[in-house]
Amino acid sequence: MNQHNRPTNVAARAVTGHGHVDPSEAYWDPALETQSRDAWEAMKLDLLKRHLRHAYDNAPYYRRSFDAAEVHPDDVKTLDDLSRFPTINKSVLRERQEAKPLLGDLAAVPEDEVVYVSASSGSTGVPTVSPFTQSDFDEWIDYEARQFWSSGLRPQDRYCHSLNFSLFIGGPCVLGAQKLGALSIHGGTVPSERLLTMLKTFQATAMWTTPSYAWYLGETAVKEGIDPRKDLAVKRIFVAGEPGGSIPETRRRIEDLWGADVYDYYGLSDIFGACAGMCEAKDGLHWAEDHIHVEVIDPETGLHVPPGGRGEMVLTTLKKRARPLIRFRTGDIVSFTDKPCSCGRTSIRLLGVHGRLDDMLVIRGVNIFPSDVEAIIRKDHDFTGEYRLIVERVNHLDQLTVEAERIRGFNGTDEELAKRLKDHIKAVSGVGAKVSILDADSLPRGTHKAKRVEDRRDHVWTA
């Protein structure tokens, strides 16, 4: 069944807050998306002033932090004045959450106003919670609809959401596709054979997954005698979680395999699902400027980097009431441009995530730190506490192997110990790892800083 033959009833799936959006319309919100740069800057300044006041008045941490730094929301007259305010990072989020469970003292609303939480793994094994009020959630989903629309998704599409739904911030993004009127299939992380059956049965025209899995799924289809270009109807693939979608060579290989357009998206668990994504011009990722203010700084000096230059991305929420994030250091090394896009949208565009400041690994779209594994191993006294993480690419998929030493005199079996560690890692981080049990003193000991990670991948993608 071809997507163009699918009967549609856009009126039956009216877009809340936007009425009936004509599928031929280029923009979800034309006035917003095509406004001048001066209008963007004025809008952000107004939102920032109100948001800083909300954080100061309602979040105990921010009141203490701002007062200690001798800054106040009333001091902000321009966007550049934000640089006087203190930064925070992931460690602060974890620390403040543990200091005042469940939401922490960065939260700026009582828990009874929170309607949804996502979570990411933490080095202590305690999930780092990202809370949303109803208005936060509605604003987020409206942005996802806007972003999908810019990538060409329309009400006549059938969209298969092939991302994890278990506390993962990317799960609810499917509601953005539903909001614009697409028939939405909540696929989730199902086995490849089942996903291919779903794509074929429903003749899905679009899907979202990671770049490596899009490649793997296409190759699996070919091995099973399915030609993705002819036997499936997928014409748009949204990818996130790995750098591949913004690497032209990688994107073209996936597109050639599927006969589909690939659009890269960027998000982070601490704010919301996709904060940026490619329009049909595929010239960088349009940023959610009305939701998140971006600074790019030199990680050593903290000074702003000029447009186009590389530096650490620092984010400040502009609307998220449940837990404002003021000058959140992401650890991502990025570059942006504010030059006009050929699509007519005027928002700044993310040109790429060029690296990380820390040792975080991304395994099949899931973030994991060596410290996540260390916390698990060192709580189990059947291990010496020494370990090593080996990352390889096997059949186009990233594979994590954890090598861990058992103590001398351990009475159980290696198989039992490996399964226990594997299960704990999966429960804490969501990453499925291979585990290799070693004799005590098998791993090298560092005299200064132990080398915990051995990354055997040459680059993001291999031929």
Image (cartoon, grey):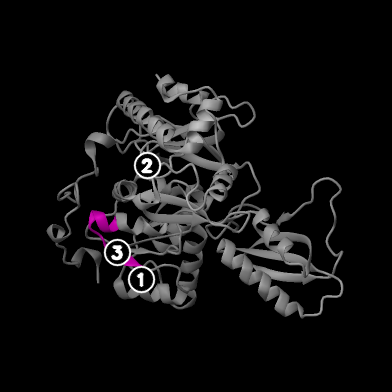
Q: Residues within 10 Å of mark 3 (few under 14, many from 20)?
A: many
Are the two marked residues, 1 and 3, in contact with CB atoms closer than 8 angstroms?
A: no
At label 3, the amino acid type is: Ser
Whether residue 395 appears in this view of the structure is: no
**Mark sitting earlier along the chain (1/3):** 3
Q: Residues within 10 Å of mark 2 (few under 14, many from 20)?
A: many
The residue that label 3 is drawn on is 184
Q: Position of residue 401 (x, y in %)?
A: 68, 65
**Mark sitting earlier along the chain (2/1):** 1
At label 2, the amino acid type is: Arg
- Which quarter of the image is occupied by the C terminus? bottom right
Residue 269, compared with residue 254, is above or below; it is: above
Q: Is residue 181 magenta?
A: yes
Q: Where residue 199 is drawn, which disc sits there?
A: 1
Residue 410, compared with residue 307, is above or below; it is: below
Residue 311, compared with residue 417, is above or below; it is: above
Q: Magenta part of the protein: which range?
A: 177-186
Residue 238, compared with residue 291, is above or below; it is: below
Query: For the residue labelled by badge 1, is the local secondary structure a helix, a strand or a loop?
Result: helix
Label 2 to label 1, Cα distance in Å? 38 Å
Left or right for 132, reference 98? left
Q: Where residue 321 is drawn, which disc sits there?
A: 2
**Mark sitting earlier along the chain (2/3):** 3
Which mark lies nearer to you, 2 or 3?
2
Which mark lies nearer to you, 1 or 3?
3
